[in-house]
Amino acid sequence: MPNGSDKNYVRLLHQIDDFVHDTGKWPTTFVLRQDFRANVRSILTPEGFRPT
């Protein structure tokens, strides 16, 4: 597991991969903690991060 600024992004990717592997479906929503969301948002472009 990475320990840099992208560690939460990598965790998110692993969670998505596990979900798809287990269910065969792409997740439609995510519930993220505020600090986790802020970290991932700092890594992605505005187009890549669209909170609803």
Image: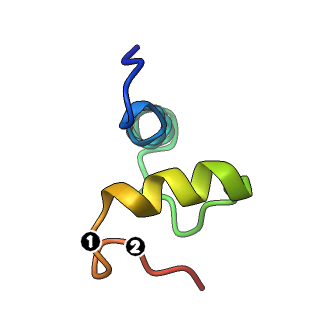
Question: What is the quadrant of the C terminus in the image?
Answer: bottom right
Estimate how packed mark 1 is, as few (under 14), some (14 to 19) or many (20 or more) residues with alpha carbons within 10 Å.
few
Q: Is residue 45 left or right of residue 14?
A: left
Question: What is the quadrant of the N terminus in the image?
Answer: top left
Residue 35 at x, y percent in the picture: 67, 51
The residue positioned 37% from the left and 26% from the top of the image is 4
**Count of marks, rendered view:** 2
Residue 30 at x, y percent in the picture: 61, 61
Q: Is residue 25 left or right of residue 31?
A: left
Check if mark 1's residue and mark 2's residue have beta carbons within 8 Å: yes
Question: In the image, is residue 4 above or below residue 41?
Answer: above
The residue positioned 50% from the left and 40% from the top of the image is 19
Residue 45 location, quadrant: bottom left
The amino acid type found where label 1 is placed reads Thr
> Which is more toward the observer, 43 or 11?
43
Estimate how packed mark 2 is, as few (under 14), some (14 to 19) or many (20 or more) residues with alpha carbons within 10 Å.
few
The amino acid type found where label 2 is placed reads Phe
Label 1: element kind: loop
Q: Which residue is mark 2?
A: 49
The residue positioned 32% from the left and 80% from the top of the image is 46
State how the image is colored: rainbow
Residue 16 location, quadrant: top left
The label shown at residue 45 is 1
Residue 18 at x, y percent in the picture: 46, 31
